[in-house]
């Protein structure tokens, strides 16, 4: 086997000297490298997108584990179903806090708190209005929940939720044309069964962005004391942050067996979105793999050319005692070496690109904007034209504020192994053909 290995490497060196084989081998190597680069970049972007959306959702939207305080089964099983539903409305802070304390005693829980949320209308000076998703949270959440504090990026003002204060998202502030220190009127209906509308006046203490367009459109926060003065019937829910968010499913399963049926984890809360994103990732990966397979098929033509050029040497090797299996393994090694020469630069460049994708995209945008600006100024010397807008890949309307990337070692090993399998499959037919070349026919024609 070592001799076949040495001869295969010799054929690699020989392919540089033969122009026909060299161009064919170069095409194979470049195609494999480009295919792997596309795979790593595509999968890392999709993984990163899923990670980015879920990280923001886990910290701000659905948390790791949520306890729904409005569920009927949370109320003791006494009386009719109508009375139990009425009991839900009166379910107060103390009862839910007792449940929170019991859940927070688990060693997997990093942070827990009560919260309430509802849809409201924000108005400023009677001239502008915006719909917001108002959430009541503890005033000290920014000190005790480092994940939440990290995600909520302050654009202006302070991260304070004192009595009578409200924090609003940057997009809501733009809609209302409002700033820190301004007064906003909050209109809401606490009970869907009544038509009474309540209005409260609050002061904007801070303007924030969390990096997720969906949440930046509407999210707003008030403190516990402000919420107590505003809401009387709105039930409390419980947010739980675990040390490891992957344990959320096990955590819910364990406590559901103990009667806490109102627990849901972040995967259940975002099931449809997660399923759609994973499906998209798999489809993109499959398309890139098919492209890579077509690229690897070029090995077949390369080895065919090499076999034709090396018929005389094959005949000599057969006459020296080489069996067909040894000749076949020689050309299989040749195919594997071609694949390796494409895989190594492909993985290296792919990881470099995916790791610096944000800088590359932003830099490309700046270069294109500069070229666009030069063309505009040159063209403006001869005729008037509107000034072009700066090219931004991450505009304010983009779903995320940056491109997250993530790829695992298993995924790199998967594409590497798959490329080798494709290479062996493509090299097998010409390698078998080379193994059964008869030495007497080759040497007779010489």
Image: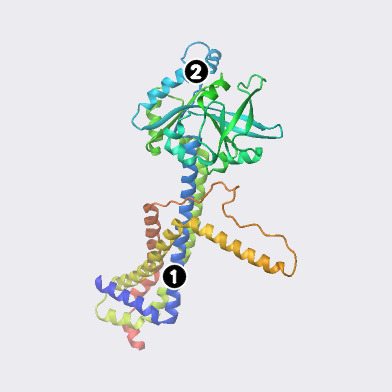
Q: Residue at x 63, y 64 (%)?
A: 372
Real-space Cα distance between discs 2 and 1? 69 Å
Tell me the colour scheme of the image: rainbow
- Residue farthest along the bottom direction in this orientation: 446
Lateral position of residue 218 relative to residue 282, left or right: right
Horizontal and vertical percent for residue 108?
Answer: 35, 32
Horizontal and vertical percent for residue 225?
Answer: 52, 23
Q: Nearer the viewer, residue 114 or 348?
A: 114
Disc 2 is placed on an element classified as: loop
Lateral position of residue 315 relative to residue 360, left or right: left
As drawn, 203 above or below 389: above
Horizontal and vertical percent for residue 221?
Answer: 54, 32
Q: Residue at x 57, y 40 (%)?
A: 216
Q: Quadrant of the C terminus?
A: bottom left
Q: Pick whichever of labels 2 and 1 is earlier in the sequence.
A: 1
Q: Nearer the viewer, residue 414 or 321?
A: 414
State which quadrant residue 391 falls in. Answer: bottom right
As drawn, 105 above or below 319: above
Residue under numbered circle 2: 92
Disc 1 is placed on an element classified as: helix
As drawn, 85 above or below 152: above
Residue under numbered circle 1: 28
Crowding at mark 1 (Cα within 10 Å: few <14, some 14-19, many 20+): many
- Residue farthest along the front direction in this orientation: 181
Q: Residue at x 46, y 63 (%)?
A: 35
Observer able to see residue 257: no
Image mark for residue 218: none
Horizontal and vertical percent for residue 151?
Answer: 48, 41
Observer able to see residue 219: yes
Q: Residue at x 33, y 30 (%)?
A: 107
As drawn, 321 above or below 50: below
State which quadrant residue 415 falls in. Answer: bottom left
């Amino acid at each position: 086997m070592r001799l076949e290995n040495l001869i295969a490497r010799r054929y690699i060196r020989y392919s540089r000297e033969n122009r026909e084989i060299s161009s064919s081998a170069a095409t194979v190597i470049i195609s494999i490298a480009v295919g792997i680069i596309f795979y790593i970049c595509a999968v890392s972007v999709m993984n990163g997108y899923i990670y980015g959306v879920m990280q923001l959702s886990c910290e701000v939207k659905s948390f790791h584990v949520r306890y729904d305080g409005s569920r009927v089964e949370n109320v003791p099983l006494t009386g009719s179903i109508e009375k139990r539903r009425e009991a839900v409305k009166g379910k107060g802070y103390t009862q839910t806090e007792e449940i929170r304390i019991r859940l927070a005693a688990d060693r997997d829980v990093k942070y827990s708190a009560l919260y309430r949320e509802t849809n409201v209308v924000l108005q400023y000076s009677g001239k502008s209005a915006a719909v917001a998703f108002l959430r009541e949270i503890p005033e000290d959440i920014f000190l005790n929940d480092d994940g939440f504090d990290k995600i909520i990026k302050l654009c202006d003002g302070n991260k304070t939720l004192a009595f009578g204060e409200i924090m609003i998202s940057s997009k809501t502030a733009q809609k209302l044309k409002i700033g820190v220190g301004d007064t906003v009127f909050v209109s809401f209906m606490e009970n869907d069964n009544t038509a009474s509308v309540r209005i409260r006046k609050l002061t904007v203490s801070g303007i924030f962005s969390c990096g997720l367009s969906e949440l930046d459109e509407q999210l707003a926060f008030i403190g516990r004391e402000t919420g107590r003065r505003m809401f009387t019937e709105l039930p409390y829910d419980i947010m739980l942050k675990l040390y490891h968010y992957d344990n959320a499913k096990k955590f819910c399963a364990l406590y559901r067996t103990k009667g806490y049926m109102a627990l849901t984890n972040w995967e259940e809360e975002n099931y449809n979105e997660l399923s759609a994103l994973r499906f998209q990732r798999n489809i993109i990966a499959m398309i890139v793999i098919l492209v890579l397979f077509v690229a690897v098929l070029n090995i077949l033509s390369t080895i065919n050319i090499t076999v034709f050029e090396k018929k005389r040497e094959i005949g000599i090797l057969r006459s020296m005692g080489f069996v067909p299996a040894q000749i076949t393994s020689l050309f299989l090694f040749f195919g594997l070496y071609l694949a390796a020469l494409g895989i190594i630069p492909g993985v290296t460049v792919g990881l470099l690109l995916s790791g610096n994708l944000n800088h590359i995209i932003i830099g490309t945008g700046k270069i294109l904007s500069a070229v666009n600006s030069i063309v505009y100024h040159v063209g403006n010397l001869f005729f008037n034209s509107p000034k072009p807008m700066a090219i931004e890949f991450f505009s304010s309307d983009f779903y995320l504020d940056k491109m997250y990337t993530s790829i695992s070692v298993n995924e790199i090993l998967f594409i590497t192994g798959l490329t080798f399998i494709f290479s062996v499959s493509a090299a097998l037919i010409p390698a078998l053909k080379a193994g059964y070349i008869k030495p007497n026919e080759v040497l007779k024609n010489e």
